[in-house]
Image (cartoon, rainbow, N blue to C red):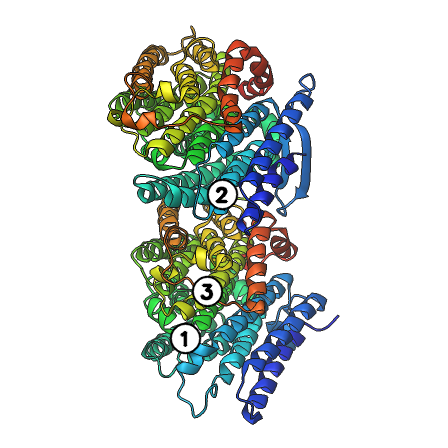
Amino acid sequence: MFPPILLEILVLVTGFVLLLAESFSTSTSKRSLASIGIFSLGWVFALSFFVSSAPAAVDAGSYWNFYSADSVSLLFKRIALLTTMGVLVMALDYESVLAKNIPSSRPGAGTGEFFILPLFTCAGLMLLASAVDLVLAFAALELVTISFYVMVAYMRRSHASLEAGVKYLILGALSTGFFVFGITWIFGITGETHFAKIALKMASVQHSDVAILFALVLVLVGLGFKVAAVPFQNWVPDVYQGAPTPVTAFLSVGSKAAGFLLLLRVLEPFLGVSSLAPKILLVLAFLAGATLVFGNLAALPQNNLKRLLSYSSIGHAGYLLMAVACVGTARSGFGSVGSTVGFYLFAYLLMTLLGFIIFSLVSTHSKGEEIHHFNGLAKRSPLLAFGLLVSMSSLAGVPLTAGFYGKFLVFAQAVNSGHWVLLSLGVVTVGAGFYFYLRVVAAMYWNEPSESAPIPVSFLTKTVITLLVAGIFFFGINPKPVLAAFQQTAIQSAKAPSH
Amino acid sequence: MLTTLLLVPIVVAAALFMGMGCRRWAKYSALFQLVLTLLLWLGYNQDKGGYQFVSSSGPLFPGLDLSYSVGVDGFSMVMLLLTALVTVAAVWMSPVIESRSNLFDGSVLLISAGATGAFVAKDLFFFYAFHELALIPTFLLIGFWGSGERQKAAWKITIYLGLGSIILLIGLADLLLSIPEAHRTFDLQKLQEVAASHLIPAVAQVRPWILLTVGFGILISLFPFHSWAAPAYASAPTPVAMLHSGVLKKFGLYGMVRLVVPFLPQAFTQPVLGTWTAQDLLLAALLGNILYVGLVTIAQKKLDYVIGNSSVMHMGYIFLGIASLNIVGLSGACLLMFAHGLSAAALFAICGALREREGSLSFERLGGAAKTIPFLGICFAMATFASIGLPGFANFASETMVFFGGFNPGASTFMKTTTILSLWGVVISAVYMLRAYKAVFLGAPTNASLKWTDLEGTAKFALALLPIALLFGGFFPRYFLSYLKPTLEAALR
């Protein structure tokens, strides 16, 4: 059994070694960097099954009390590792586009960091999964965000990418400011930064409700940016569309997972204040409703698939927020909110990654990102079309896919908490979702292709696509492996306070 | 055994998608399904009753009694037989496909597998999930191989059914959560016992009742949620229309009988809208099906729309049987599900065969076909008579039971009135079906119909299965009722 922190250390070390190797290597091909990255992450993933899981010690003396390695954080670490591996596979296929958009003296130069930076994001995500202290959480979140700043703006010749980079940098920095301000307020009220201790202080010490609510609002604004909740979603479509596709996929999965994990952790102490809990949940319900409606309805008229997926990402944040709005109020049944959010994120990872991998391949070869560039894909490349069909069905929530199970859990939580307004909004948005996701399917299967040449797919990518499709079906039928992790140590925030 | 029944079409469909095999594979798969279903039918021990051929995977959801488990009781056995019969006819009656025929055949098999899965599932989650296995294949089939305004119809049916399913999902969650936690389970067999102990208070039954009835109602095309059905069936390729109207739509009714009737019987008498009880609302809606849609059907000028609308109209009778909440009405409703499935499938099959020969199905372009295609003509006549409810066909036996169930001494005045009004539906359906028969098959042959050729080879046998089963059900309804009765008695306990 290894200490759990070893996982993050290994990822970081791999990142640094690769960075050094990249700067000293003379070879023009940077592809091997990504391959080594995928390979090492695979090893770390395997290793994650052999670490001793131990929740953090809360007592003040322990230095490591800010780091918790319970089974939920381990699961999130694995999710981060898998996502990064998928992103690196995509990055390999994306190299040609990347090389075209980077000014360089010789072909292929300057692409190296693109394959290495995701490792740092991954380390940040993994640390975040274990953070039970606001300071570590903030540091980890910044590691994630700052590596994204670089990656989003990576294609320096592409105006869209640069624009996306600037937008993401400015709004990201702003949201970070809000988040830090929120942390200082929390520290000011309680004098603590450890989640469990904050919870204890908040529940026991007398303080003004207004101060607590203000702190919460600041934190919500900060995290709202990360998870793309309305009204903090403005940056999403442009940034997602402009960023290199692998980065978009990473943003949409990794950034969202990080944000929601932190949101659940941060909310717990606040919900412990019984006089405030109903108000907080009302705010969350409003956020959820607005995000659901905006994300799904704004996706309807989109013709650019990348933009459509970015609105869909907002829509899915809405479903996740719908589950978060049920924290603490749910009667027993259908597992905890934490496990719902966790499973949803896991399912979202599978289907979004699959969607972006195929999108990236097709848009590179069809020289366009519009839905009509996918016309007749079923004839050109049946495997890619089928993969995208599965991904879109799962995103739309067709049963026997992982995406459906996630939605099922979310709706069950909402029924359990009696959120009937949110549920009726949910019905409308699911209907809208069927339309805009199946538009892609219709283009692929109903229309005739404009080009007939099949799209070449590397063996590695084929394997990943097959695995993701299999995963979507497997976890859509048997969610136990993922849900069981939440059973062992329920995520802290999910514990229903006894009122 | 049941898992094999379910997996064979899925595996064959997957093989077809991967480019292996040809239509013959789909035919073998359908035949296998029929043979296995017949073996199950004969192997089902009626004296023992209850769920048989059960197998289960063990719990799949930590903390909840949810597992992949299959099993059949008498009621699901009847539905399974319907599925197998219609599947065989549907695969054989599939039109010749030039482009990507494997995708077509595989999708048809998936629709059938979805229906099979829903009927063999002994777990509520999989009961729901399998039904939607058919959603995407239907979307692809109608949109690409359909006729007329196929894409519009494909969108309409998919979004309508998607919405219906999500409302249904919320309803199912609400139903399960209103059961006290100690008794909460996804196992349909255990749920049957839970329902019998009536643990949900009458007032709490109303909300899940509304959600489930609207959810199932959309899937069944209950008035006023019916507008997706007729255009979709009219544009759908033959096997899709057959499977969807014949089998898949019965999923909703099956769910009503399995869940709404046993769990929420008191909701029927609770006031929902002013003084209107839930039952009154349901009766008003089904009158919409029978009278309004019936009259709409008379006004149709094209054969496919007549049959599509008539399929919607007949749902009203089945709802009447369910709303009566007594064993006579309920048995009639369930037998009618079987009978209507066969007759609707037969009508759609012949309608598709005519479309293949003619292209347009406007009445003014058809006529005198009985001379050139006598076999199709006879089958159409028999399906027509069955659909009207002529004695000798299973539809007659079941509709009679529905009317007896509706007009029983204990029924409310509105119930009795509805039953009397529904009787006029028989006249309405006689009007449009006989007119359709006359327009297509009688009279002087048109130039087009002289060139038509009749069905050939094994397709004849496949199509003939449906009217033969209808006749059998008409002469020996008791044979089927003996399978249905134990389940329905348990549901009404």
Chain letter of mark 1 equals A
Label 3 Cα crowd, 10 Å radius (few <14 / some 14-19 / many 20+): many
**Residues at marks 2 and 1, CA–CA distance in whole angstroms:** 50 Å
Which residue is under mark 3? A356
Task: Label 2: state its secondary structure.
Answer: helix
Under mark 3, the amino acid is Phe
Dot label at residue B144: none
Which residue is at a point 38% across and 69% down the rendered structure image? A240
Task: Label 3: state its secondary structure.
Answer: helix
Chain letter of mark 3 equals A
**Residues at marks 3 and 2, CA–CA distance in whole angstroms:** 26 Å
Under mark 1, the amino acid is Thr
Dot label at residue B107: 2
Which residue is under mark 1? A176
Establish if A199 lies above or below B302.
below
Under mark 2, the amino acid is Ser
The residue nearer to you, when weighing B382 against A414, is B382
| Residues tagged by mark 3 and mark 1 found on one chain of the structure | yes
Establish if A494 lies above or below A266.
above
Q: Is residue B55 left or right of residue B275?
A: right
Farthest residue, direction right: A1
At which x and y percent is residue B53? 68, 30
Q: Nearer the viewer, mark 3 or mark 2?
A: 2
Q: Quadrant of residue B379?
A: top left
